[in-house]
Amino acid sequence: MRFLKNIIFLIILILFPLKITAQDANLSAEQIIADIYEQLAEEAEMEIDFTSFYDDLMALAENPINLNNTNKDELDKLAFLSDVQIDNILHYLYRNTPVQTIYELQLIDGLDMTDIQRILHFVHLGDAIQKKEKLDIKQIFKYGKNELHFRLDRGLELREGYRFLPETDEKAVEANSKKYLGDPFYNHLKYRFRYRDKVQFGITTEKDPGEQFWGKHNKGYDFYSAFFELKNVGRLKTLVLGDFRANFGQGLVVRTDFSMGKSAYVMQVTPRSTGLKKFSSTAEYDIFRGAGATINLGKLDVTAFYSRKRIDADTDTINGTFSSLTQTGIHRTLKDLEKKNTVLQQAIGGNATFTHQWFQVGTTAFYNHFDHSLQPRSANYNQFYFCGQEQWAASVNYRARWQKINFFGETAITDKSALATLNGMNFNPTSRVSLVALHRYFSKEYDVLFARTFSESSRVNNETGFYLGAEVRPIKYWKISAYVDSYRFPWAKFGIDVPSIGKDYLVQVDYFPKRNINMYWRFKLEEKARNFTDTVSTMSVVTNQTKWQARYLLNYTFGRFSFRNQLDANGFQHTPKQATYGFSALQDVAYDFKKFPLSINARFQVFDAQNYNNRIYVYERDVLYAFSVPMNYGLGSRYYLNLRYDLGESLSFWLKFAQTVYADGRTSQSSGNEEIPGNRKTDFRFLLRWKF
């Protein structure tokens, strides 16, 4: 009964919000970043490494773009803008530089007040012609900024992996050998140095929960990373040393950053960041370790890079093979340590890109080599996956603008003559309408290890699809976003034993009448094939299954208070006669003290998603550089409290306490070493940032 009352109370809050008065407060840079991450992560239903994106935007907040002297590379970092909007900005600047007032942004086609309010955090008006700055070592260390981050996490309930048995017999000894080697704390330590947008370097160390920090099997942190980045010095556009990322074209050959993919940002379907950039995350996969550089020769940029690093894999040392890569970066048990750094991976690549005023064309080449042979375990769905020790891939990519149409694409081929191509166009017929169309074809034989682009599945392989998106602003304060994506898998996939087809639909309606209030309604429908096994059939049966998701969200501020109300519902059609449903409702409250350097935000949420297919992903605020989209599965409630305290301008603390309480009668959660007794799961996080 109490659970039902909570649901009714939250529905009342959502449907009948408090009367709101207009406020002049704008969104902070961090809030804008959080909004973008929320849209992307909830659609992806998987963890996204958002660190580099966060770094880019926060760097722009501290060192804004000079609109009177900028380029596409800089504006591409503003991921909340579409390609059409960026091209329209550049076109306006080309005709009207120098811009005299920031209010001229209202004259640019395709920009509404919401877009402009976001842009203002990251741009300024400077001189149209800037003198080239010479690097001075004394100036770098005098005016450079240092940051030190220390983070500590702990799940308060003790998991099974930390419970050791008295070693009274061989079974107990064997059971203990499979337990975690370390303590349940997560910890990372980061140091960063930045001098404007010219020089950056840093060191990252990390220990995951269960990993041994100091003992027989490990000495110190489990993961170490370091980087150095130098930008825009003479003809040297970028120099990276240590750990770095590489992104070229549409990502058909090399892309180690995240891609926008399908989301409520329906126009953002192409990768943004290009070229080489530092790696400053704690993720332990999809990175290069070595050196790379980009040289600018007028309209031509030439890039070359080399990487040599050891990676985790289940290696068979006798046969010199491994069946799969291990990408978790977690080494908690003896079995995990057996896979650590067992394969040497070397990679070399390059890119040449020619940029003209109205078009851009580039070519990318990439070579990967293992010192062991990759031999995936035989299965029907992976017959065409990459196997062996080495792989070549190359591509040609392009962008072009003709009147109000932008064309883009990339075509790639491997050393086995496997083909992949992605092509599309953006069209902006009026300032209130934006359209995008994208076609992709990835042959079943195409499987490049570092490829990442717009696709239905995470692997760029065995897929053909066509995407249509539209963004319309019919009247003031309203925006309608929609897409439809139809795709086909010509060969079997994991979990689908035969060739199959699928369709995705999304419609979102945004309403933002004032600066301090906005809301949206979203509906998404997925139709795709899945293996289905009942109690009668003796083998898997492939059936078409449907899942729909609906959301209503309201954000508003009242004085120094900020509120967020959200309702989620979904339905999953297992068979024509069997359907299950999920539900979630939440209330967020945040308060920023005026005379006290303290910010507080809290949430209470109830959910009912007792079938796994009805699980609900909801973004929640976290400590700095932690991005959370926990999965809500079962029947229960979740609440959290976040605190941020600034001790002067140099020292800041973040603290988060979160707990999920299940009300479905369960006596334990998860399984194996991760099993937790009881119906509660409690998490604690602490972060310290010191600027000096």
Image (cartoon, rainbow, N blue to C red):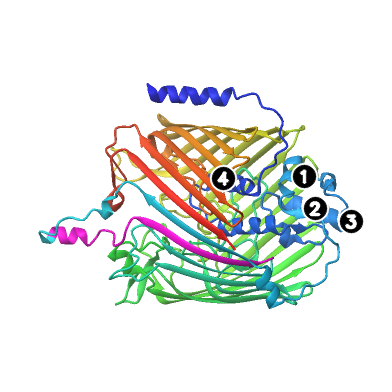
Q: Secondary structure at mark 4?
A: helix
Which mark sits nearer the N-terminus, 1 or 4?
Answer: 4
Which mark sits nearer the N-terminus, 1 or 3?
Answer: 3
Q: CA distance from mark 3 to mark 4?
A: 36 Å
Q: Which residue type does callout 4 highlight?
A: Glu
Numbered circle sitting on residue 111: 1
Q: Secondary structure at mark 2?
A: helix
Residue at mark 4: 38
Q: Which residue type does callout 3 highlight?
A: Arg
In the rendered view of the protein, which quadrant contains the C terminus? bottom right
Can residue 77 be seen?
no
On screen, 441 above or below 552? below
Q: Secondary structure at mark 1?
A: loop
Residue at mark 3: 95
**Residue 179 lies in the magenta stretch:** yes
Which mark sits nearer the N-terminus, 2 or 1?
Answer: 2
